[in-house]
Amino acid sequence: MYKFLVASSVLMFSTLAVGQELTAGDIIRKAMDHYRGQTSHAQMSMVIHRPDWQREMGMKTWTEGDKRTLVRVTVPAKDAGNGTLSVDGNMWTYTPKINRVVKVPSSMMSQNWMGSDFSNKDISKDTDIIDQYDHELVGNYQQDGHYVYVIQSVPHEEAAVVWGKEVLHIRDDWVMLEQQFWDQDDLLVKTLRTLEIREMDGREVAAVIRMSREGVEEEWTEVRTAAIEFDVELAANLFTLSNLRNPRE
Amino acid sequence: MTLTWRLAWRNLWRHRRRTWLTVGAMVFCNVLLIFLISLQLGSYQMMIDNSLASFSGHAQVQHRDYLEEQRMRQSVPHAAALAASARDTLGLETVAARGMAFALVSSEQRSFGVLLNGVQPAYEPGVSTFPGLVHQGRYLASGDGGHIVVGSVLAQNLKVGLGDELTFLGSGRDGSFAAGVAIIVGILETGMDEIDRSVAQVPLAWFQDVFSMGDHGHTVVVRLPSLEHVPVAVATLQGLVAGQDNLVVRDWDALQPGLRQAITSDMASGWFMYAVLIVLVAFSVLNTQLMSVLERTREFGVMLALGMRPGQLARLVGMETLLMSGLGMAMGVLLGAVLTWYLSIAGFAYPGMEELAAKFNMPGRMYPEVSFLSLLWGPVVVLCGAMLAAIYPALRLFKLAPVAAMRAA
């Protein structure tokens, strides 16, 4: 499930020459392709903000390609040790309180993840945008000396996707600046915005991203990346259920 | 005046059989109306009570926004204590606190999302019929900890039975991870798949612990002896939570808005049938009175010639109608009252109804509602209908010319 967060927060700095002849599909595909096949290890925090309360969680994430993600909560102490493993679209959760691994069923995928503004479905279906959407370059603009592509992605007729369309703003160095989720009645539901971009481990990284629902701006969830390493060596058994239960990290 | 009344009374019995037939029709109509209206009102009462008794109660104390948004943090502080003071203030045992949380429940083999309920085992049976519908095992008891009662369809879906363990994953009130393991002690079957698929109840104290609720709950449910007590109880509860701006008291109408709509639409179709019945009786009275006026044309002519004014004659006819329909009403109400009063004590059941109701832990018999409204509404309208029907025959008297009338055949 964290693939999505990582995909959106990791900046793909490309040394490839970006030509104007790139199609919208190519832009998304290049960004994703660049991201695929890499490994990463990051320290992040998630801040869930509501008008009357706020909650912050620290976590470590490991990814390999776009099919494998492991997340482990580190703080607060009460929640430390909780982990989520996602492999090939399946999701499992481990909770030390009851010492059990539980598979998250597909019926729960539309639920909010840990009370945040991210749903399991948003997160786990990140690569759907390549396979199941048609892309169209609908605009561009200049920002901070960068060229920004605006791409509208509409799911295929038969795609099992909840959104009517998504609108992405992707910078020419492959940073996703904004991702809008529109429902099937063509109303904007929520937006993921990149608030801060920093260089980490030699790449431009979307260090702070914020998801907020349309119309309730005082409620949001931010994912802040404190540190990230790319192309790290990962243990072979990292993305297994037994490691989820008994971390050997 | 008394002379006119006596005259009217005697006139009535000049055609004994005709009068009795008309009175009989009115009595029959009145008894039928009383029976049907009482039964209808009684069945609404039962319908409301049954649907409220199953889970929602007659009134609930909730967080202001809980009904609409159902968020974990929209909770009622000191829920159990509030329920206890509500019990004291209302003088009722049927008050219970509940907590509710959406959780992922899993067995060895399956996982489903459910709305988990934290209930007070000692008081929940007073506010809900579910505890009485435990099919296997037992309901929760005071002192239970990690124990759970689930609906039969949910148990089937999870492929679990008594004694098996279920695990829960969800978010606590503070947003933390909530997780717990509970042993199934009871499986309940309401007969309604929708409910049997979703019910999962654990003790409130354990629930509060697992979901980091502290002493909070999400509602305090109040079940009352009958609907009439609702306004007073709601006012009392409002007094109890007056200091807490976030809390509101919601009555059954706010909790289950569909219920009143169903009743209103059913009532409309009922009233239509009654109106037809009343119109028929009114025509029968019209017929009787018109005949009795027409056959007395010569007599009325004589009376006019003797100096009576047409208005007095019209009043005479009106009095006759009033006496006749008053008689029909008195006998109808008496008979109807005896019948419905008997049924309201003995109950009334269709064949097979008791077996059906037992399955749902509901009362097996319907009890018609005996009240001023149910007893008098029908007969009063019949009486008014009869009086209206007498207007036409009475008006005819104003057209009578004494001499012509006396010579009429």
Image (cartoon, coloured by chain):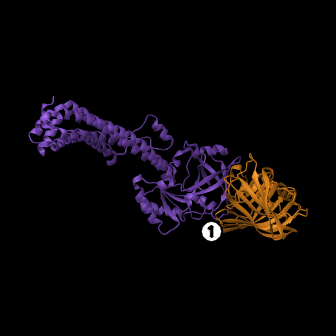
Chain colours: A orange, B purple
Which residue is located at x 63 percent, y 60 percent?
A: B210
Left or right of A166? Residue A232 is right
Residue type at mark 1? Pro
Which residue is located at x 51 percent, y 47 percent?
A: B132
Secondary element at tag 1: loop
User: Number of numbered discs present?
Assistant: 1
Residues packed near mark 1 inside 10 Å, few (<14), some (14 to 19) or many (20 plus): few
**Quarter of the image containing the C terminus of chain B?**
top left
Residue B52 in view of the camera: yes
Pick the front one: B186 or B304: B304
The disc numbered 1 marks a residue on which chain? A
Residue A122, given in percent of the width and then of the height, sits at 73, 56
Q: Residue furthest right?
A: A16
Left or right of B85? Residue A240 is right
Pick the front one: A146 or B50: A146
Q: Quadrant of residue A210?
A: bottom right
Query: Mark 1 = which residue?
Result: A51
Instruction: Say above or below: A69 vs A159.
Output: below
